[in-house]
Image (cartoon, rainbow, N blue to C red):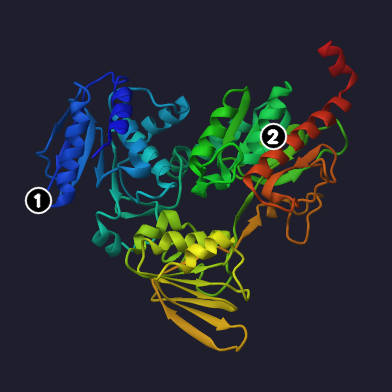
Amino acid sequence: MLDSAMQSQLQQYLTNLREPVELVASLGDDPKSDKTRELLEEIAALHGDVTASFDGTDERKPSFIIRRAGDAQKWVRFAGLPLGHEFTSLVLALLWAGGHPPKVDADLIEQVRALEGDFEFEMYFSLSCHNCPDVVQALTLMALENPRITATLIEGGTYQDEVEERGVLAVPATFLNDKPFYNGKMELAEVLSKLDSGADKKTAETLSAKEPFEVLVVGGGPAGAAASVYTARKGFRTGIAAERLGGQLNDTLGIENLPGTAYTEGPKLAANLENHVGEYEIDVMNLARGVKLSPAAEAGEMHTLELANGGTLKARSLILATGARWRNLGVPGEQDYRGKGVAYCPHCDGPLFKGKRVAVIGGGNSGVEAAIDLANIVGHVTLIEYDSQLRADEVLQRKLRSLSNVDVLTSAQTTEILGDGSKVSALVYKDRESGEESRIELAGVFVQIGLVPNTEWLKGSGLDLSKFGEIIVDERGATNLPGIFAAGDATTVPYKQIVTAMGDGSKAALSAFDYLIRNESAEEIAQAA
């Protein structure tokens, strides 16, 4: 099951085990059970402290639990093979069960251990989903730290009938005590905030108690990460307040246009940026979403950022790098069937539509790439483009035209998404030339029509925004408000690319540096001397 490189890598990781680990499998007579047995035997052969047995009695076959030897109360179960994007989750489960300490804030671990009540989690993932590992790993850690928490992590492709029965049309999909809990990516702190009613209040108090920053970066994508590294290297007390570190990178798969890097993937690049930020004394505040900006009354005073959890942060200068999100179609049925057939991530949710008919809305690079990827999984793809021609790069269009199970409709306006109340069943579009409406029977709709800047919360702050909601910046990344700079996809820069976001973040940081040294008070200069 594991190639030689993966075996060597896993064997090296297993040297960190401090306690023996047991793998207990429940298997049937099917090929996937045979593969599960093979995988567990390979893992057990790599280290003497790992044993595998095959006498489990769980109804899900194949499945297996991971637990510390002799501790039957704390365990995590994988139903299906946790390979692909979940191989790292498998490795971490083995290490954590074996006593290797997780790289997680100690306060969060204590919150997990202190949870009262019985929590039975079931979570569905796909092997191509790059958002799923965060949820898998959060639930795994919780189950291995608190005996009243269990986590069963289910590979949707192996349990297709179960996925259909529960109406799972988007992953990650999490159930708690047999009821829907949350659809989408969650980190450990987010899970805890949903379970512990006092978590947000505690976090808000901690944040509000922080000393003012010299530079506060709002946003943790490529622009925000670059900005924070630059200001930290200048010696300024720097903080990052981010709704999620990595930003849109977490939803991006292949990246082939970053100079110096022939190929990488979004989550990997996001992890690299996080590690780089971690090399400096930067106060990283994750899951911190801004809701109100109160600019300083005059230069030298503090700007105030209010957060969704009730906390406040103060800073002498701000760099706004809040990024953007997928644009919605805005047609009837879209919100009703979001997560029930309407999707925005083909890599995450595509495997759930294996053999079915789907549509992709959007003829730019994102839309055409999505159609190409989905064509290898689903039964048929209809690409719908509002314009009279596709806007994607010619190399992508040539690839698209070579696929036999893809139809392309141009000058087509999507007008409605239909369903049976629980899932998508059809799409209605209008021919913009003839005005004729047509209906396509399908099971899924993937929306890929561009981005919307995350700036609604800045309205009324005095910050100048364009008619599209973008933060207006000059060539230095400066806004109309002294001491406030902006970078990346949330701004009026013409090209929304990872590499330009990094450059803009660095430029905004240098501009913030220039602003701060020109506005130092006499007292500060004396203290520095």
Give the vertical position of 451 relative to 461 (above or below).
Answer: below
Q: Is residue 523 left or right of 425 when viewed as pictured?
A: right
Who is closer to the viewer here, 69 or 191? 69
Rendered location of residue 64, percent (x, y): 20, 40
Q: Is there any visible trace of residue 519 in the rendered image?
A: no
Earlier-in-chain disc, 2 versus 1: 1
Query: Is the residue under label 1 in contact with that under label 2 (CB below 8 Å)?
Result: no
Give the vertical position of 4 relative to 500 (above or below).
Answer: above
Q: Which corner quadrant holds the N terminus?
A: top left
Residue depicted at x 26% and y 59%: 160
Q: Is residue 399 left or right of 235 when viewed as pictured?
A: left
Q: Which corner quadrant holds the C terminus?
A: top right
Q: Secondary structure at mark 2?
A: helix
Who is closer to the viewer here, 94 or 113? 94
Check disc 1 and report the residue beneath it: 29
Label 2, label 1: how many angstroms apart (C-alpha)?
A: 55 Å
Quadrant of the image occupied by residue 300: top right
